[in-house]
Image (spheres, helix red, strand yellow):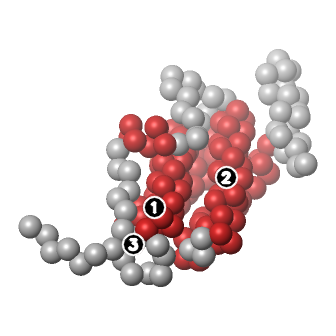
Amino acid sequence: MMRDIGAPALGLDGGTRAHAVAVLNRVLSNTALLQQKTRKAHWDVVGPQFHSLHELWDKQYRRLDARVDQIAERVRQLGGYPIGTASGWVQNASVHENPGRVSSATDAVIELMIDHEQIVRSLRADIGKLQDDMRDYGTADFLTDLLRDHEEMAWMLRSLVQGEAVEADGEIAHGTVPQLA
Ligand SMILES: [Fe+2]
């Protein structure tokens, strides 16, 4: 039998910790799926950009993988348990998988960029609530650091395709990259 020493005494009530754990488990799910999608892109890429994209995605999936571990351990610090199954991640993520599809290099860049930007927007909302309403500064700061990571990765991907010329078959047209508002 395990000794019960109660919940972490961090000055956060149970409701706040439960909220933060739910947010972190959603973020964990998105990060784990995006890590795997990035790794798949690293495996699949072909074409003139092969070397640079293969290397970039290698760095990005390792960065995301390190984040998965940090997010899971933050869940434990708040007294929760991290989702640790692939099916659990799929259920909890807003990032979608594209099974059975091999994208062109440019399409893969755009798809991953869209995922990073979507995560940035949802993190921004989560951070606001955790910081201003719930005073969970530790989780808010942790997620802010993560948000900057996603902003940087989104920028790197966006920069690869911004201004890309229209291809002859029209498949990848200039303007398919969402522009800044
Ligand atoms: Fe590799």
* Label 3 close to label 1 by CB (< 8 Å): no
Q: Is residue 179 left or right of residue 105?
A: right
Instruction: Tell me which label, 3 or 2, sits earlier in the chain.
Output: 3
Q: Is residue 58 left or right of residue 89?
A: right
Label 2: how many Cα within 10 Å (few below 14, some 14–19, many 20+): few
Relative to 1, residue 64 above or below: above
Label 3: how many Cα within 10 Å (few below 14, some 14–19, many 20+): some
Instruction: Tell me which label, 2 or 1, sits earlier in the chain.
Output: 1
Label 3 – label 2 distance at C-alpha: 22 Å
x, y percentage for residue 150? 65, 58
Tag 2, which secondary structure?
helix
Residue marked by disc 3:
77
Q: Is ligand 1 closer than 8 angstroms to the Cβ of mark 1? A: no
Q: Is residue 145 visible?
A: no
**Picture residue at 55% right of the left edge, 29% below the top:** 98
Label 3 – label 1 distance at C-alpha: 12 Å
Q: Is residue 169 visible?
A: yes
Q: Residue 18 bears which disc, if any?
A: 1
Residue marked by disc 2:
122
**Picture residue at 70% right of the left edge, 60% below the top:** 124
Q: Residue 55 bears which disc, if any?
A: none
Relative to 77, residue 22 above or below: above
